[in-house]
Image (cartoon, rainbow, N blue to C red):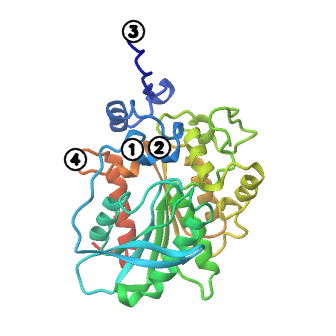
Amino acid sequence: MAQDSPPQKTVVQNAIPDKYLAGLDPEWHRMWTEHGKGVIGAHLVTIEEFQRCPSKYSLTYPTWEGPPVHQVHDVQVPVSDPEGFITCRVYTPPGEGPFPVHINFHGGGWVLGGLSSETAWCRSICNNASIVVVDVDYRLAPRYPFPTALYDCWSAVQWVIGNSEALNINPNSVSIGGLSSGGQMTAVIAHFARDSSPPINLKLQLMIVPATDMRYVPLSITNAEPLTTETCHYPSAIFLSDLPWSSLARESWFLNYYIGTDPETRERILSDWRMTPVLAPSFENLAPAHIVTAEFDVERDEGEYYGSLLRDAGNAVTMKRYAGVPHAFAYYNHPERGLSKSREFLSDSAKLLRDVHHGSQSK
């Protein structure tokens, strides 16, 4: 008798709930329908399984490596918590210098990502803003849990400034920024810079879809009670929790690897302002900030709330919400096959950083 066929793994069809259709960016709707509906959510597998085949569990189309730049080289940066080295990739434009510098902390929920994640953005900014871009390959959880990634990034900022001559950069024209988890670390590092001795006067903190308050995220991925206005202050987290591309369950998956699942440890870390920047003891005298949010993103409202805290404390703050697009919209900036909103963001970022570092009259 023939043996039964092995069970087939079910492909999760991530259909978009009808309630979202009217407001979605048409390009994103089409991209997700054609390339995202069959993706198995990363939160349904272990990190080890994801790392074996990342393309199976994430929408990776359409991306590109970005334009050629004048010079790219890697440097080894010493870190101390725990001791070791991380790689930073330095993108340098043509010209004599010294150049302004922007230090980038990639996204990926403190668990995923690396030097290939945002190369198109780094290359484009280097060329179009005529600045050096330093991309930081900080260490990832679960091997390196909170707060290793944060202090790796802070060490990178200090190292870049301390090695300005070798990098051909102007140590008085430094900005920092990052996407999602990178945006969260940007927020915290701006406080570190203000409080360092002597203070580091940053030109800009660029927070892109930042995770500034994740206390509402449930410990359980599958058995969580629905969020309500009593358990969560952010309408976007409540009403967008079942988005197929960046659900509340996916937020929980990232957080569980970064801060662990022990309830007491988790509560302690989430009460620490270095994890939850909206709890910072002081918002005064921070670097000018620009906050990017996406309309169809669980983290939208916490990012905008953080901007209001900065503004209320007297800081210079600008914000822009990109309509109709998801949390990770910034990645899809391919010049022919990407999202128009992503290319708009790329253009906006280049102009912002060019103006910040070279003056608003720069071309």
Separation (CA) of disc 1 from disc 4: 26 Å
Q: Residue at position x 60%, y 88% from top?
A: 198
Question: Which is in the foreground here, disc 1 or disc 4?
Answer: 1
Lower sequence index among marks 1 and 4: 1
Q: Which residue is mark 3?
A: 1
**Residue 44 versus residue 240: which sits nearer the camera?**
44
Residue neighbourhood size for the residue with mark 2, other residues' Cα within 10 Å, grouped as few (<14), some (14–19), many (≥20): few
Residue 18 image point, x, y percent: 48, 24
Separation (CA) of disc 1 from disc 2: 7 Å
Q: Using the rendered view, name the quadrant where residue 5 is placed.
A: top left
Q: Which mark is residue 336?
A: 4
| Quarter of the picture holding the C terminus | bottom left
Residue 176 image point, x, y percent: 47, 71
Q: Residue at position x 30%, y 49% from top?
A: 63
Separation (CA) of disc 2 from disc 4: 32 Å
- Tell me, yes or no, if residue 276 can be seen here: yes
Q: Give the secondary structure at mark 3.
A: loop
Q: Which residue is mark 1?
A: 53
Residue 324 image point, x, y percent: 43, 40
Lower sequence index among marks 3 and 4: 3
Q: Give the secondary structure at mark 2.
A: helix
Question: Which is in the foreground here, disc 2 or disc 4?
Answer: 2
Lower sequence index among marks 2 and 3: 3
Residue neighbourhood size for the residue with mark 3, other residues' Cα within 10 Å, grouped as few (<14), some (14–19), many (≥20): few
Does 26 sit above or below residue 4? Answer: below
Q: Which mark is residue 49?
A: 2
Does 225 sit above or below residue 276? Answer: above
From the viewer's perspective, tell me whether residue 243 is left or right of residue 117: right
Separation (CA) of disc 2 from disc 3: 34 Å
Contact between marks 3 and 4 (CB within 8 A): the answer is no
Amino acid type of disc 2? Glu
Question: Which is in the foreground here, disc 3 or disc 4?
Answer: 3
